[in-house]
Image: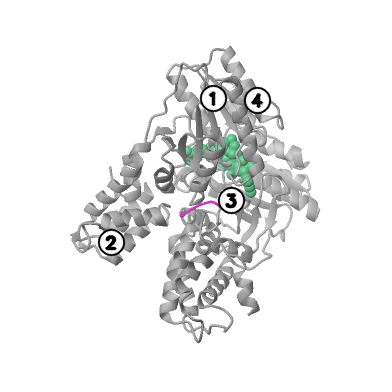
Amino acid sequence: SRSSRQLTENIAAVFTRRKLDEDTLEELEDILLQADLGVETAMRITDTLASGRYGKEVSGEEVRGVMAEEIAKVLEPVARPLELDLSHKPHVVLVVGVNGTGKTTTIGKLAAKLRDAGLKVTLGAGDTFRAAAIEQLKIWADRTGSTFVGTKLGADAAGLAWDAFQTARDNGSDVVIIDTAGRLQNKAELMDELAKIVRVLQKHDPEAPHTVLQTLDATTGQNALNQVEIFRNVAGVNGLVMTKLDGTARGGILVAISAKFKLPVYFIGVGEGVDDLEPFRARDFANAIAGVSA
Amino acid sequence: MFESLQDRLGSILSNLTGRGALSEKDVSAALREVRRALIEADVALEVVRGFTERVREKAVGAEVLRSVKPGQMVVKIVHDELVEMLGSEGETIDLNAPAPVVIMMAGLQGSGKTTTTGKIAKRLTEKQGKKVLMASLDTRRPAAQEQLRQLGEQTGIATLPIVEGQSPVEIAERAVQAGRLGGHDVVILDTAGRTHIDEPLMVEMADIARASNPHETLLVADSLTGQDAVNLAKSFNERIPVTGIVLTRMDGDGRGGAALSMRAVTGKPIKLIGTGEKMDALEEFHPKRIADRILGMGDIVSLVEKA
Ligand SMILES: Nc1nc2c(ncn2[C@@H]2O[C@H](COP(=O)(O)OP(=O)(O)OP(=O)(O)O)[C@@H](O)[C@H]2O)c(=O)[nH]1
Ligand SMILES: Nc1nc2c(ncn2[C@@H]2O[C@H](COP(=O)(O)OP(=O)(O)OP(=O)(O)O)[C@@H](O)[C@H]2O)c(=O)[nH]1
Ligand SMILES: [Mg+2]
Ligand SMILES: [Mg+2]
C-alpha cells in the first residue's frame, strides 16, 4: 500500500547506515506516531529497540525488522480465530461499537463466512434508531441467505434482541448475530441501553451473548483506546474487529489496545464487499506499520 | 484519560520563577510537553512540527507577566497560536449564488455525510427559510438512498425520487435539474463514502463535482480521526474544490486534533460541527473551544488573560 511504501522510504532515509543515537530514535518514534501508536507505545518500542543497540551502526533493514518484531510480540497473543461454541443453540454474537465504525457491514461479511462454513445464521436488526439501518441489514441478510429478524424504527432494541434469539432458537440456527445502533462511549444513557440488551439476552441463556464483538475504525486516533475500555466494561466486549484497513490509516492504536486489554482481534475489514473480511495476522499488521515488505 | 497540558507544564516548570522574559531553555522544555499533548490529541505529526516551531519563535523572549508562571505563559501563547491556526469564527455555509445553489458532501465511509446532509437541509429550511432538495448519489452501500429518503420524511424536506440503475453522475444531473424545475433554493448532494486511494471512486467524485458545479463542497470528517487526517484532507482537496470542512462526532470525548490537521493542510475553514445523531445536532465552529479541548485545559487561558 501507499503508506507502507511511504513508511519504508521514511525509514530507509533515516537508516542508510547510521549510528543509533537520540536523533535517530526520535525519527523512528515519529514514524510510529504517524501510524497512531500513541506516545507511550511508540516510546516503549523505540526503547526496546535501543537497548543493546544504542550507539552501534545499524542498517535500515535491521531496524525495520526489529521494529516489526517488537510490534508483532504485542499482537501475536491477540491474533486468534473466532471460535464458536455450537453446543449453544444458537451461539449469540452481539456486535457493538461507535457510530459508523462498520458494525452492520461486518455482520454481513461474517454471516457470509459462517454460511460458507455450512452454518445456519439469523441476523437481528437491533439498530432501531438510525434511518434505514434495518433495511441495510435486511439487504445483507438476503445477500448471505440468513434469516432476518427486524422491527420498526424506534422500537425497543432489547425487545428485538429477545425476538431474534427466539427466532434463531426456533428455526434451529447455529448462530444469531445481533446488530446494535452505533453509540459514543461517553453517552451514559446509550451505554445503559446496551447493558440492557445484554441483560435481556441473558434471560434466554445466562451465558449469552457468547461473543461480543466491537468494531474499531482504523482511521480513529487515540480515542479508540477509550472506546474499548468503556464498551468492554459495559457490554463485556470479548473480541475486536478493525475495519477500513484498505485506506491509508494503519490502525496503530490497536497495538496500544492489545498491550492494555489483551482482547482477541478476530478480523480486519479491507473493503465494503462481502469478501472483504480477513483474519487478523499479527505479522502482516506489524510489518505494515514498520514498513517491512512481506 | 489524558493529563492536561497545564498539569504537565506545571510539573516541569513549577521550579522556574516567573520573572523577566522566557528563555530558550524554558521554552524548549515546555515545547516537548506541548508536542506530546498535541500528538495525544491526534494532531498530525507534520502539523505539530510546524506548530511548535512557530510557538518557539513567539515564545522565546516573550515577557512573562508578573502574576503568572512561565508555564502558564507558554500555554497562553500555544493557545493563541492554535486559535489563530484553526481560523476565524462565523464562516458558515455560503448561499450567495444563483439558485439552485448546489452543496456537495464528500468524505470517507461512515464519516457522517448522510446525517449531516439532513442536518444542513433542516437548518437551512428552518433558520433561513430556504426550499431544499436532498439527493443521495450513493448507489453502492446497502440502503444508503433509503436512509436519506427516511431522513427527508422525518424532517419534512424533499428528497429526489430514487430511480434504480442510474449512475451517481446521472443522479447529480437529475437533482440539479429537479432543483431548477422545482424552484428549490438549495440542492444538497450526498455522495457515497470512499477511501482516498480508491482511484475509480475518486475519479467518480471529481466527475460528480464537474457535472453539478457545486457552490459549496464540504468535506465531512470524523473528529475522532487520527494521523490519517492529513492524508485524507490532502487527497480530497486535490480532487474536488473543497470549500469547507464539517467535523462530526464532536459530542464524543476525543480531543479533536484532526481539526487542526485538516485546517492546516487544506487551509479551508471548518464550517460546522456535528454534535449528535439527531437532526438538530449541528453547531457553528468556535476555534477557541476546540483549542481548549485539544490542549485539555481548564481555565488557564482566562487566568493569563486577566493577569
Ligand atoms: N473501505 C471500507 N469501508 C468499510 C469497511 N467496513 C465498513 N465500511 C463502510 O463504512 C461505512 C459504515 O459502515 P456500517 O457497517 O454502516 O457501520 P455501522 O457501524 O453499522 O454504522 P452505524 O450503524 O451508523 O453506527 C459504510 O459505508 C461501509 O460500507 C471496510 O473494511 N473498508
Ligand atoms: N454521535 C454522533 N453521531 C453521528 C454524527 N454524525 C453522524 N453520526 C452517526 O454516524 C453514523 C454514520 O453516519 P452516516 O451519516 O450514515 O455516515 P455516511 O458518511 O453517510 O456513511 P456512508 O454513506 O456509509 O459512507 C450514523 O450512526 C450516524 O448517526 C455526530 O455528529 N455525532
Ligand atoms: Mg449499523
Ligand atoms: Mg451515507
Q: Residue A30's quadrant in the figure?
A: bottom left
Residue occupying the point 46% across, 37% down? A240
Q: Which residue is mark 1?
A: A208
Asked if residue B104 lies left or right of residue A9, the reply is right
Rendering coords of residue B236 (x, y %) = 51, 53
Q: How far, Cα to Cα, is label 2 from label 4?
A: 55 Å
Rendering coords of residue A163 (x, y %) = 64, 21
Q: Chain of mark 2?
A: A
User: Hey, which residue is sitting farthest bottom in the picture?
Assistant: B20
**Residue type marked 2:** Val
Q: Which labelled disc corresponds to residue B209? A: 3
Image: magenta residue range:
B218-227
Q: Chain of mark 4?
A: A
Q: Chain of mark 1?
A: A
Mark 4 CB within 8 Å of ligand 3: no
Residue occupying the point 61% across, 35% down? A194
Asked if residue A179 lies left or right of residue B146, the reply is left
Q: Nearer the viewer, mark 2 or mark 4?
A: 4
What is the secondary structure assignment of the residue under circle 1? loop
